[in-house]
Image (spheres, rainbow, N blue to C red):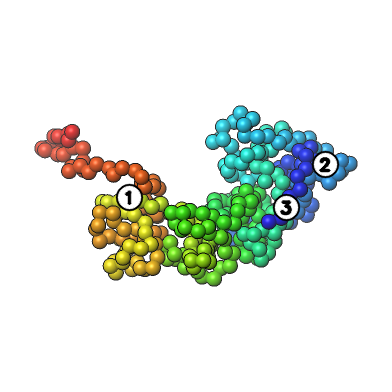
Amino acid sequence: MDSVEHFPPSRLICPAMRIKHNKNSLRKIIDKSFYLVIDSSYYFSNAGDDGNNSARSHHMSLLYWCNNKESEENFRCGSCQCRTIGTTYYFCNECNLGYHKECVESPPLIKSLFHPKHHLQLVRIKEGIGLQLMNCCYCGSSTSFFSYYCFICRFSLGIVCEKKPTFLSNKKMHEHVLNYFPRKNNLICDACGVVDNESLTYVCLQCDFIVHKSCIYLPFVIRISRHDHRLSFTFSHPSKNLSCGVCRQKIGENYGKYFCVKGCTYEVHSKCATRRDVWNGIELEDEPEEEVYESINSFEVIGDGIIQVNL
């Protein structure tokens, strides 16, 4: 990860004006995505730098969240359009917009540990009819406006996400720290049993453990729409040659899965169990079991047009 020089706010250029004063205005369209290559600096090179009087009118102020009168929930960075909250941010008095500190101080070209093979180019991704936005390879959200991109590998990385550490830890999933593995070698994730070269991969070399970033924080106890009881995630539950309760395909015994906590012969692939149309997104670990009522409905029909309420 390249180091960034820190300049006083008076020498920084507002991202909106940075686009207007871009040197070459090189544009590229790839897979219906429109890219404006940003090759200009994020700061004025010297005090006598002329021709940018309009840009200098966009005075940047460095602020802290404790001084922010606007609630964090309402914050949206004017550069990357993300709501990620940091400890500091910049505010432009002319644009009346707040910007992540990382987005304002973003070099046009960087070398990142998340993509060590090639440099990443700062681009502005434009929205429009028929145009598609790329997703950040780290967080999965749409990388609108400013982002880093590799045109060779079509690798997209949000500016704030580029500053994230290359290791993750979740003791529930694995006892050791997991390190980012940049190579794409059709590796099978131990948590879901699927090859996904679009997802970031993390490994524990000590244990020969491989997991997608999206699988590191899988929920451990859930309810799905396809089964009456709760399901629990496990690596070790003995397989009984069952098929997945959602997709009906075979479940590999060496990979993570969900099984019924009540002892039913019911298992589900971890990918299938966490689909949006199957799971409501609520983690139930440490939550008490719901009471089970004999009658599911709150009423029953006892005659023509007559119902009885079940109390």
Name the residue that disc number 2 marks. 52
- In the picture, the quarter occupied by the N terminus is bottom right
Residue 108 lies, with reference to residue 65, above or below; the image says below
Disc number lying in front (2 or 1): 1
Residue 283 numbered tag: none
Query: Which residue is under mark 3?
Result: 3
2 or 3: tag closer to the N-terminus: 3
- Give the answer, above or below, for where 296 lies relative to 112: above
Task: Give x and y (percent) for residue 79.
Answer: 65, 44
Q: Residue at x 40, y 55 (%)?
A: 275
* Residue at image coords 31%, 66%: 239
Q: Residues within 10 Å of mark 2 (few under 14, many from 20)?
A: few
Determine whether the residue tagged by mark 3 lies in a helix, strand or loop.
Answer: loop
**How far across and down, in percent of the image, does residue 83 sit?**
57, 42
Which residue shows up at 36% across the image and 68% down it? 252
Examine the rendering and report whether any part of residue 252 can be seen. yes
Q: Which residue is mark 1?
A: 223
Query: How many numbered marks does the figure carry?
Result: 3
- The correct choice, above or below, for 225 with respect to 153 in the image is above
Q: Is residue 234 left or right of residue 296?
A: right
Going from the N terminus, do you reach mark 2 or mark 1 first?
A: 2
Q: Residues within 10 Å of mark 1 (few under 14, many from 20)?
A: many
- Amino acid on which disc 3 is placed: Ser
The three-letter code of the residue at mark 1 reads: Arg
Residue kind at label 2, given as amino acid type: Asn
Q: Nearer the viewer, mark 2 or mark 3?
A: 3
Q: Residues within 10 Å of mark 3 (few under 14, many from 20)?
A: few
Q: CA distance from mark 3 to mark 1?
A: 46 Å
Discs 3/1, front: 3
Q: Nearer the viewer, residue 26 or 166?
A: 166
